[in-house]
Image (cartoon, rainbow, N blue to C red):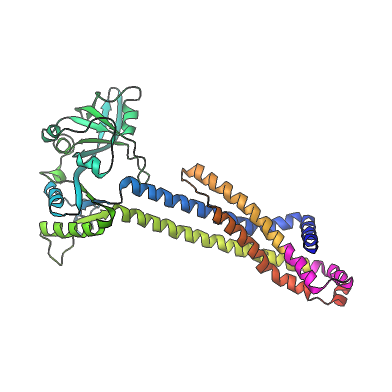
Amino acid sequence: MKTLDAFSDALRSLRSNTMRSVLTTLGIIIGVGAVIVMVSVGNGAREQIKSMIDRLGANIMMVRPGRSFGRGVSGEAGSLPTLTEDDAWAIQNEIPTVLLVAPTVRGNAQLIAGNLNWSTSVNGITNEFFSAREWGLARGRLFESGEIKSSSKVVIIGETVAKNLFPEQEPIGQSLRINRVPFNVIGVLKPKGETGFGGDQDDTVMLPITTAKKRVLGGRKLAGNLVNNIYVKAKNAEVVTQTEELIVALLRERHRIAPNQDDDFNVRNMAEFMNARADSSKAMSILLMAVASISLIVGGIGIMNIMLVSVTERTREIGLRMAVGATGSDIMSQFLIEAIVLSLIGGLLGVVLGLCGSFAMSSYSQWKAIIDPQSVILAFSFSAAVGIFFGFYPAHKASQLDPIEALRHE
């Protein structure tokens, strides 16, 4: 019953100074809310990165040419044309852990269909590309081997291109022009969604690699059998590291690179790339959690400060309570419960703020936020711990007051 009375007294005391109580709990509210938002956004980031890895394939690697270097200036990645289709087939045939390879060329072009036009990326590929990227067709068919050998003018388009060039008709069988060269649409890719950088994977056109090099892209960087990229799919995720090492050794041998020379190519592991992004996201979450923790501590200091002020203001009341029989422990529990109630109210408001903030951030940024009930309970419990920790000293100080001196206090 004494505990209930203490809670009742605490609520009555807080209501008598509503604005001061709200301002005191502001640090707790912001801290708890920030913890919940950061954990939910961090969970959403991890889930999205996992989804990206699943879409790309944890056993996928990409081999790209190196950087050109001249007159003291380093070119962009892939600016040094060194990879060939022969390199791709050597990787396929000489490395036992490789399931398949897909050499590709890439560029940008203007597409025209009727009175509509669209600028997009153009990819010259072989049919192995679809298996390597695990990218199927929504409708239509793949390239025939004869179409690839003869550089036929056929294309497979992404969903975004289909919507923009053929908004009210079936694209299959339609004609479009790429850099004024007419092509026949034979397929539409399944929607793939955004890349890790927010780019639209469905905004693309696929051509036979021979057609792309001879009729659309060309140029010095694609002369002969040069390619821009080689996608490599390992047999499973467990052998990716081994496969990557074998690819590096094979290409260094094929390109006659001396032991003291740098590679003229680079191999990127998609899973490693996404894991690096996950580590960056985790580091940012830790930083923001640290900021939220500081806010909680500042809120706790605010509670201690206001409780010390309250002890000073109510010194005569404390003396009266002691004069009628209240013990030091009764006084201590009264002020300690008041501090806990203050922090719990702040924690409860912080939970509401955190939930609303998580949903708002998810809605605004299109970044999925996953609410973790454990984080909510942990943040709320921490707010109570802050009340106990920072409320102890003022409560102890109140319990140690001399009743006579307290009654004399004006």
Is 253 left, or right, of 311 in this rendering? left
Q: Which residues are magenta?
A: 312-338
Using the image as rendered, state which of residue 246 and residue 395 is in the foreground. 246
Location of the N terminus by quadrant is: bottom right
- Magenta stretch, main secondary structure, is helix
Residue 344, percent from left and from top:
67, 58
Residue 220, percent from left and from top:
14, 44
Residue 36 makes an appearance in the image: yes
On screen, 140 above or below 220?
above
The structure residue drawn at horizontal position 17% and vertical position 29%, both measured from the top left corner, is 153
Is 375 left, or right, of 147 in this rendering? right
On screen, 261 above or below 40?
below
Is 274 left, or right, of 94 in this rendering? right
Residue 309 makes an appearance in the image: no
The structure residue drawn at horizontal position 23% and vertical position 53%, both measured from the top left corner, is 75
The structure residue drawn at horizontal position 74% and vertical position 70%, both measured from the top left corner, is 395
Residue 389, percent from left and from top:
65, 68
Location of the C terminus by quadrant is: bottom right
Q: Is residue 336 magenta?
A: yes
Q: Is residue 324 magenta?
A: yes
On screen, 394 above or below 111?
below
Residue 145, percent from left and from top:
14, 34
